[in-house]
Amino acid sequence: MGQVKVMKTVLAKRVSKRILTVPESEREHLLTMAQGLDDVIMLGRGDPDLETPPHIIEAAVKALRNGYTHYTHWAGMLELRQAISDKLKRDNKLAYNPDTEIVVTTGLQEAIFVILQGLLNPGDEVLIADPLYMSYDRAVKLAGGRTVFIPTYEQDDFALKPEAILEHITPMSKVLVLVSPNNPTGAIIPEKTLEIISDIAKDNNLLVISDEIYEKLIYDGSKHISIASFPDMHDRTIVLNGFSKAYSMTGWRIGYMAAPADFIKKIQILKHTLTISVNHAAQAGAIAALTRGEECIHQTVEIYRERLNFLMSQLDRMGLTYGYPSGAMYIFTNIASTHRTSSEFCRDLLMDSHVLLFPGTAFGNAEGYVRIPCLIPIEQMRIAAQRMGDVVRDYISNDRGPKNGGG
C-alpha cells in the first residue's frame, strides 16, 4: 500500500475523528501505480465504456439551448419525477406519488449518504451482504453507525442467505441494505428468498434500503423483484435506482430515491443542503431515458452478456474459479491458487502484464478474490485475457507457499 503520509499541517492535524474512521482506498494506490506504466488495460473501475445513447444526449443539449441552466425544485423536475413514478409502477409494481415520494439525487452516492445521515443514530447497526460496494460502509461510519457484514460465499454464487441475516441481527440492528443485482459479485436475490427476507425485516423491525441500480442488467432468464413490492414493505423500504449503469450515464451523476412521503419530507432537507438540485440538463436527459423506450438497454445487455461469457471462458482456461454472475457487469474471481493475497495479485499483475484490477479487499472482507468488470471492448478484453493467462499460469505453477486467500 506504500507509506502513509504523515499529517503535518495545522489543518491536517485537526480533522474530525469522524473522517479518521474512513481508511484510504487500495484502488487509489493501484491507479497511481498504473500512471507510471505504458499500455495499461484498465479493468478496474465500474465505469461503462459504452457511450450514453444519442437520444439522451440530444435531449440534454436541446435543454441547455432552451435555457435549462438554472436550479430546479430540490426534489427534481416534476416531469422527471412523474416519469420515475411511471417506471416504478410499470417495471416494479410500486406506487409512489411523484409530488411527495420521489427525490432526484446527484447519483446514488448522494442518496446513500443522505439516507444514512437521516436514519442513523450513534451505534445503530446496518446489515449488508459481504462482499459489498464499500461506499455503504464509509457512509455508515460517517453517520456514526456500525456496518455488520453478512458473509456470502462463492459456492453459493455469493447469494445472500436469510439464515445468515438472522445470525447477525442484534438489538442495535436498524437497517438492512439489499443490493440486487450485486456489486461486486453479480448475485441476484431470488423472489422466494426476498419473501423470506421481507418477513425477517418485519419481524425484527428493520428498515430496508433496496439498491436496484443494476436491475436492468440481468442474464439467463434471471428476474429482478423489488422487496418494496411485498406486503407491508412499502412503509419500511427506501428504493434506490438511477441511470449510470443501464444507460451508461455515470458522468451525468443522476439517481433517485423513492419512499413514503413523511420520510421524504424530512430527508430532502439534507439533500438540499448538499447540492440544492440535480443538474437541470441531466434531468432532461433522464426524462428521455425513461420515456423513449429500452432498445438501448437491450443492446447493452447483449454486449455485456457476450463479454461476461468470454471472460468466464478465459478464467476457466486459467484455472480460476468465480461466482456465476446472474446480473450486473462483474465477475468476482478467486485467485487463491496463485499463492498471493488479493493486493499482491493486483500489484503483480499490473507490473507483469499491465492489466489493472481491483482486489477483493476493496469490497469488504474478500481476501483471495478480485473483481473483473466487463467494461472494455471485446478486442481489448482478448488482449487482457491473453496477458493475464500467461502470468496467472506462471503464478499457479510457481508455488510461493499459500497466502491468505480462498474464503
Image (cartoon, rainbow, N blue to C red):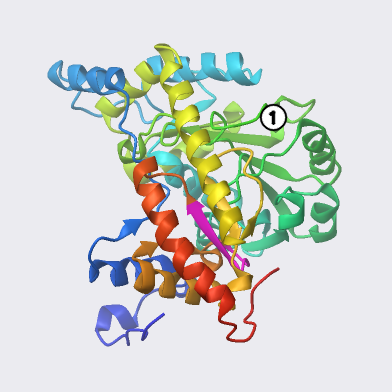
Relative to residue 387, is residue 247 depicted above or below? above
Q: Looking at this view, is 390 or 188 the one in front?
A: 390
In the rendered view, would you say 278 is above or below 138?
Answer: above
Q: Is residue 355 left or right of residue 165?
A: left
Q: Residues within 10 Å of mark 1 (few under 14, many from 20)?
A: many
- On the image, which quarter does residue 282 sit in? top left
- Residue 143 is situated, as x and y percent measured from the top left of the image, at 53, 59
- Asked if 20 appears above or below 152 in the picture, the reply is below
Q: Which residue is located at x 82 percent, y 47 percent? A: 162
Q: Nearer the viewer, residue 383 or 185?
A: 383
Q: Nearer the viewer, residue 350 or 131?
A: 350
- Identify the image quadrant of the C terminus: bottom right
Q: Is residue 118 visible to the viewer in this orientation of the structure?
A: no
Give the quarter of the image for residue 284: top left
Identify whether 104 is placed above or below 48: above
Q: Tag 1's secondary structure?
A: helix
- Image x and y of residue 189, in percent: 72, 39
Residue at 50% across / 26% down in the picture? 102
Which segment is the magenta one? 364-372
Q: Position of residue 160 (x, y in %)?
A: 74, 49
Residue drawn at point x = 46 percent, y = 36 percent: 268
Q: Amino acid at mark 1?
A: Ala
Say if residue 40 shows up in the picture: yes
Q: In screen coordinates, is 171 left or right of 22?
A: right
Residue 37: x %, y % from top left = 24, 69
Q: Which residue is mark 1?
A: 228
| 342, 162: nearer the viewer | 342
Q: Quadrant of the N terminus?
A: bottom left
